[in-house]
Image (cartoon, rainbow, N blue to C red):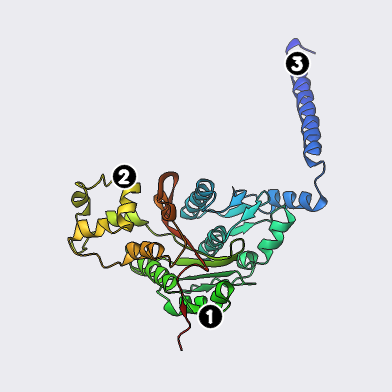
Amino acid sequence: MKQNDKAYKQNHDNALLRRQIDHREWLKAKRRSLQGVSKEERRARAELATKFFDYLKIRVPKHMSLIENYEEVLKFIQELQVAFKKRRKVFVLMTSMKSFSGDGLIILLSNVVLFKSAGIMFNGNYPRQKEVRERLLKTSFYDALYNYNYAKESQYDLTKNDFFTHANTSVDSELTANLIARYSPFLWKEERRCTGVQRVFLELMQNTNNHASRKQGEKHWWLHLSRAENPKRLCFSFIDYGMGIFESLATKDVKSKFYRWFEKMLPILNPNDHCALLEAILNGTFHTTVTKKSYRGKGLPGIYNTLVDHKISRLIIITNDVFAEASKNEYCNINHRLNGTFVYFEVDDTCHSLPKAA
C-alpha cells in the first residue's frame, strides 16, 4: 500500500472513531436528560421534533400575566406578531408556565384566533404543573386551539366554565350591561348597575372602532372578566392590537381636532416623553391645551374619571412604549412595545353602584 493510501486510511479511521465517540457521548447526554422524564413527556418531545419540526417554537412566559410580568409577556406578544407578519406556523411551548391571569388568557386566545382565522397553523402543548394545566383546561384555550370554528365573523365568544372571554369589532353596550347584571351579585349579593364599568367599556370599544387602525371597525377588541377573592373583586381586561395611543396621534390629519397637537403641547411638556403625555391625556390637560375647548370627559379622560370618582378601584394602561398604573400615579417606559392598547381595571364592593332599575 502506498504511503498516501496509508495516511488516507489512518485519517478516515480517526474521523470514524471521533464520530463514534461523539455519538456515544450524545447518547449518554440524551439518557441523562431523560432521567425522571415520564413516557408521556418523552412521546410529547418526540412528536414536537417530528410532527411540528417546521413550526416556529415560541416559549410562553412562566408567569403569563401582563399586569404582573409585562416585559416578558410583551416580548412574547412581539415574537407572535413577527411570526404572524411572516405567516410562520407557530407552536407555543407551555410546559414551564407556572401561572396565568385573565389578561394572559386573552392574549393566548386572541392570538390563536388571529393566526387560525388567517389560515396560519398555530398549536401548543400543556403546562407541566398539574394545577396550572387543569385550570387552563377549564377555560376555552384548548377548545379554541383544536375545535373552534374560525369562520370569518365579526364576533367571537369563547366563554366556558365562568371564564368570560369575548371579542368583537363594534361597540356592544348590551354586552356590558348583561355582564354587569350577571356578575354584580358576586360583590353586592344583589344585582346592581355599575355606571363606571359601562362607561369604561363603551369608551374602549369606541376607541378601538374609531382609532385602532386607519380603517374604521377593522380591528377586534378582546374582553375578559374574572372573579378574584381576598379581597373580593371583579377583574376586567381589554386589549386591541391596533396602532396604540401614540401611533394613533401621529396619524391625525387636518380634519382631526387634534391636528398639529405636537406643537401645541410643546409649551406644556415634551411630546416625545410618552409617560408625561399619557398622564396629560388622562387628566384632560392634553384635550384642553390642543383644542382650546372645555373638556367634556370623553375618551381616555372619561375612563380616568371613573377611577377618580371611585366607580372603579384600579386602572392599568399599556400602550406602545408606556406602562401606567394610573391608580398609583406611576408611569414608566417599557423595553418591549405593544402595538395596540391594553387596559386592566378592577371593581370591588366599595365602588359606587346603583340599584337595579325598576
| Quadrant, the N terminus | top right
Question: Residue 287: which disc?
Answer: none
Nearest-to-viewer mark from 3 and 2? 2
In the rendered structure, which amino acid carries the disc numbered 2?
Asp
Residue 158: horizontal and vertical position, in percent? 57, 71
Left or right position of 55 against 154 = right
The crowd level at tag 2 (other Cα within 10 Å; few <14, some 14-19, many 20+) is: few
Secondary structure of the residue carrying tag 3 is helix
Asked whether residue 222 is in view, the answer is: yes
Question: Residue 191: which disc?
Answer: 1
Q: Quadrant of residue 22?
A: top right
188 is higher (above) or lower (below) than 245: below
Return the residue nearer the eye: 121 or 239: 239
In the rendered structure, which amino acid carries the disc numbered 1?
Glu
In the rendered structure, which amino acid carries the disc numbered 3?
Asp
Residue at position x 41%, y 45% in the image: 332
Residue 276: horizontal and vertical position, in percent? 32, 48
Residue that numbered label 3 is attached to: 5
User: What separation in Å lies between label 3 and label 2 (alpha carbons)?
Assistant: 73 Å
User: What separation in Å lies between label 1 and label 2 (alpha carbons)?
Assistant: 43 Å
Return the residue nearer the eye: 103 or 226: 226
Indicate which disc, 3 or 1, sits on the residue closer to the N terminus: 3
Residue at position x 62%, y 58% in the image: 123
Indicate which disc, 1 or 2, sits on the residue closer to the N terminus: 1
Q: Are marks 3 and 2 in contact (CB under 8 Å)?
A: no
Q: Are marks 1 and 2 in contact (CB under 8 Å)?
A: no
Q: Quadrant of residue 186?
A: bottom right
Secondary structure of the residue carrying tag 2 is loop
Indicate which disc, 3 or 2, sits on the residue closer to the N terminus: 3
The crowd level at tag 1 (other Cα within 10 Å; few <14, some 14-19, many 20+) is: some
Left or right position of 48 against 117 = right
Return the residue nearer the eye: 59 or 327: 327
